[in-house]
Amino acid sequence: MLSIVVILVVTSYIIWFVAPDLFKNKYYKELWAFFILLSIGVAASLTVNLLHDVPTPLQVITNILSPLILLLKNIGLV
């Protein structure tokens, strides 16, 4: 629980210090990119802290392609 609070507090401090300058200088595209990338990072951090067992992209690809490999082995192409 403490790690979630720390992530949210750090995120709010980052927004507090960076976003006003971007808005004041009318860097609207950079502001959108900032919020999108920050939200992706916060979502990934919260997911790791809440679930503790997040599969890697390699595990996801292996789970998707393993039935295809078995099919090709049964056909005799591999």
Image (cartoon, rainbow, N blue to C red):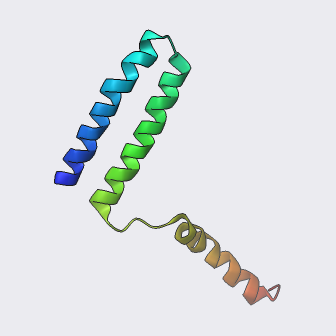
Q: For the image shown, how many numbered marks are present on the structure?
A: 0
Seen in the picture, residue 40 relative to 49 is either above or below; the reply is above
Seen in the picture, residue 8 relative to 45 is either above or below; the reply is above
Residue 57 drawn at (x, y percent) = 54, 64
Residue at 60% of width from left, 68% of height from top? 61
As rendered, which of 77 and 16 lies closer to the eye? 16
Q: Quadrant of the N terminus?
A: bottom left
As drawn, the residue found furthest toward the right would be: 77
Seen in the picture, residue 59 relative to 72 is either above or below; the reply is above
As rendered, which of 39 and 24 lies closer to the eye? 24
Left or right: residue 26 versus residue 50 is right
Residue at 48% of width from left, 11% of height from top? 25
Residue 9 drawn at (x, y percent) = 23, 38
Left or right: residue 39 versus residue 26 is left
Residue 26 drawn at (x, y percent) = 50, 11
| Residue 35 sits in quarter | top left
Residue 28 drawn at (x, y percent) = 51, 17
Left or right: residue 70 versus residue 5 is right
As drawn, the residue found furthest toward the left would be: 2
Q: Quadrant of the C terminus?
A: bottom right
Residue at 37% of width from left, 44% of height from top? 42
**In the rendered image, is residue 34 in sight?**
yes
**In the rendered image, is residue 1 in sight?**
no
